[in-house]
Amino acid sequence: MAFGARMLKTGLAVTLTLYFNSFFLHFPSPVISAVAAMFAIQPTIYRSWRHFLEQLQANTLGAVLALLAGMYFSKDPFAIGLICIIVIMICMKLKMQDSIGLTLVTVIAVMEASGQWEFALSRFAQILVGIGTASLINIFFLPPRPRQQFVTQIHSVYAKLSLLLRTAVSNEIKENIFRDEKKALEESLKSLADKFKLVEEEYKKVGGNQFSKIRDLVVYQQMLVALRKGADVLEVVEEHYFQADRDKRYGAEFDRQLERLSKFHEHVLLKFDEKLKETEPPEVELMEAESARFLRETMGTVYERADDELRLSIVASALFDYGYHIGRLDKLVEQYHRGGADEKK
């Protein structure tokens, strides 16, 4: 696991919370405040703000219930367990499941005070200090940038995909290495999909130019789809290509088509980053024609066994689909940059 900003901010939040509680507020046991700070670091600014509000509501509810129960039942274990169940039910009803863990810490800490208002409020204040400190650190110190992280991760996932596509048919990489790289690609795609959800949530919940945000999301989603289609090609090659009897000439054709598609995918990503010369000729029409030609030739070839024809046609169709979605991404990138240029005028 790579060292990241979230790890650093979590450690910093705990450290500052402990110092703040010990030297400024003089709380006797700041551990609860540190626990609250650990829960409060979120992957986006919107989630940090939402987490703070939810924790404030849920912990206030839990503290009030625990305080009332503590006055009548003291530290009775059965009463503590019953209040925990009630708090869980209320949080789930209010759709604040993410706040349950820390709220239960509040309930147990407050009920430990056995109805002593001053001690109970002190424990509750410690939790709020931990949440508030961590939220401020998350917002102002190395703030989360899910959009930049998503775009960076797109290139990283493409690099993994490109390596596998370029060697899928030629079968140059050792099988165990190919299998490990393919597994890493699948995990990266899942992580990328989760990152896209964060970007989508942030864009929809935070104000700003909504048209610009919708345009961004359409392009980002198609980037994810194109990578997914590339990964689907690997699955189809593994399931059908090597099970069919292939003429060497057509094996070389499949290899060249994969190379062309991979290069085209790279071309579109470079275009998105505006790293290509403006004189660079558009490739989408050429690639669409090439993909169609390749599919027709593959499906029009006479094979010794009907099973071979079906298997290779499936592979060719997967390649065509991959190329189609790269072409769609190329058109969206063109519109994306035209829209950005129009906004600057």
Image (tube, rainbow, N blue to C red):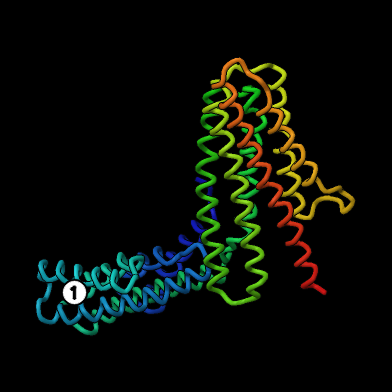
Residue 233, above or below 302: below
Residue 40 falls in which quadrant of the image?
A: bottom left
Residue at screen point 64% across, 43% down: 158
Which residue reaches farthest bottom? 117
Residue at screen point 63% across, 53% down: 222
- Which residue is label 1 attached to? 111
Which is more toward the observer, 175 or 80? 175
Residue 305 picture location, percent across and down: 57, 17
Residue 333, above or below 164: below
Give the residue type that dot 1 points to: Met
| Secondary structure state at the residue bearing disc 1 | helix
Residue at screen point 56% across, 21% down: 306
Residue 142, above or below 274: below
Q: Residues within 10 Å of mark 1 (few under 14, many from 20)?
A: many
Which is more toward the observer, 85 or 331? 331
Residue 233 falls in which quadrant of the image?
A: top right
Q: Residue 103 vs residue 326: left or right?
A: left
Residue 35, above or below 230: below
Which is more toward the observer, 177 or 285? 285
Residue 102 picture location, percent across and down: 32, 67
